[in-house]
Image (cartoon, rainbow, N blue to C red):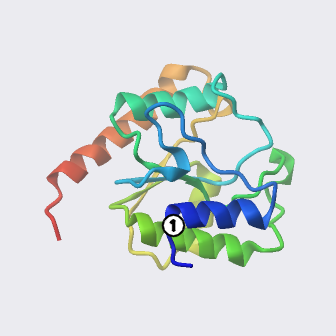
């Protein structure tokens, strides 16, 4: 089976029923987004992440406002966990790293937008050999900002800079 986003989706969800992928919602394509950028978080929590969730509204609302709904949204580790268990790596960590490499190869983003310190540390440790530029940003979760506008401004500022970079980029 050749790699494609639908094939990766099927593989990820079939490997473990606790694996999770960003959902599509309106203009946001979630995991099915084909780029141009790839947005990467560390690991999904066990939060149901409904459309009413503040973190989801912040992230999806900002991407919609910036016209970046087709960004590919993903996590370094696909397996849901409690925040308290974040340091416990899944037994199949090599599989998660391989999937992530395959996603990056498919999307071929001009930059990885890496949300939060945990994701940034994971990318540096396990994907340090990639030549794709990485742009670290604050995590969009409500736990990391007391005011919604602070997170939107930080996230929006970085994404706007990346969008401008892409429009100035010369074709290969």
In the displayed structure, would residue 77 be above or below residue 148?
A: below
Q: Looking at the rendering, in which quadrant would you find the C terminus?
A: bottom left
Which residue occupies 59% across, 66% down?
8
In the displayed structure, would residue 100 be above or below residue 66?
A: below
In the displayed structure, would residue 34 be above or below residue 100?
A: above
Residue under pointer 1: 103
Instruction: Between residue 45 and residue 85, name the one nearer to us.
Output: 45
Which residue occupies 70% across, 75% down?
95
Among the 4 quarters of the image, the one containing residue 124: bottom right
Which residue occupies 51% across, 66% down?
103
- Where residue 161 sits: x, y (%)? 29, 43
- Where residue 85 sits: x, y (%)? 85, 53
Which residue occupies 77% across, 67% down?
15
Q: Residues within 10 Å of mark 1 (few under 14, many from 20)?
A: many
- Where residue 123 sits: x, y (%)? 56, 66
> Residue placed farthest to the front in the image?
1
Instruction: Between residue 90 and residue 143, name the one nearer to us.
Output: 90
Left/right placement of residue 165 relative to residue 11 reads: left
- Where residue 160 sits: x, y (%)? 31, 39
Left/right placement of residue 162 relative to residue 130 reads: left
Instruction: Between residue 169 and residue 99, name the one nearer to us.
Output: 99
Left/right placement of residue 99 relative to residue 14 reads: left
């Amino acid at each position: 089976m050749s790699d494609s986003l639908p094939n990766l989706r099927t593989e990820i969800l079939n490997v473990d029923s606790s694996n999770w992928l960003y959902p599509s919602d309106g203009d946001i394509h979630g995991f099915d987004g084909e780029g141009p950028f790839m947005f990467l978080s560390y690991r999904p929590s066990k939060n149901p992440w409904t459309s009413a969730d503040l973190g989801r509204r912040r992230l999806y609302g900002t991407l919609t406002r910036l016209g970046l709904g087709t960004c590919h949204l993903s996590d370094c580790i696909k397996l849901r966990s409690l925040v308290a268990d974040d340091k416990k790596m899944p037994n199949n960590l090599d599989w998660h790293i391989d999937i992530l490499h395959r996603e990056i190869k498919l999307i071929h983003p001009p930059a990885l937008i890496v949300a939060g310190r945990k994701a940034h540390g994971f990318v540096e440790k396990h994907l340090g050999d990639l030549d794709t530029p990485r742009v670290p940003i604050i995590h969009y979760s409500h736990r990391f900002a007391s005011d919604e506008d602070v997170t939107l401004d930080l996230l929006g500022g970085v994404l706007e800079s990346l969008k401008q970079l892409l429009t100035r980029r010369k074709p290969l």
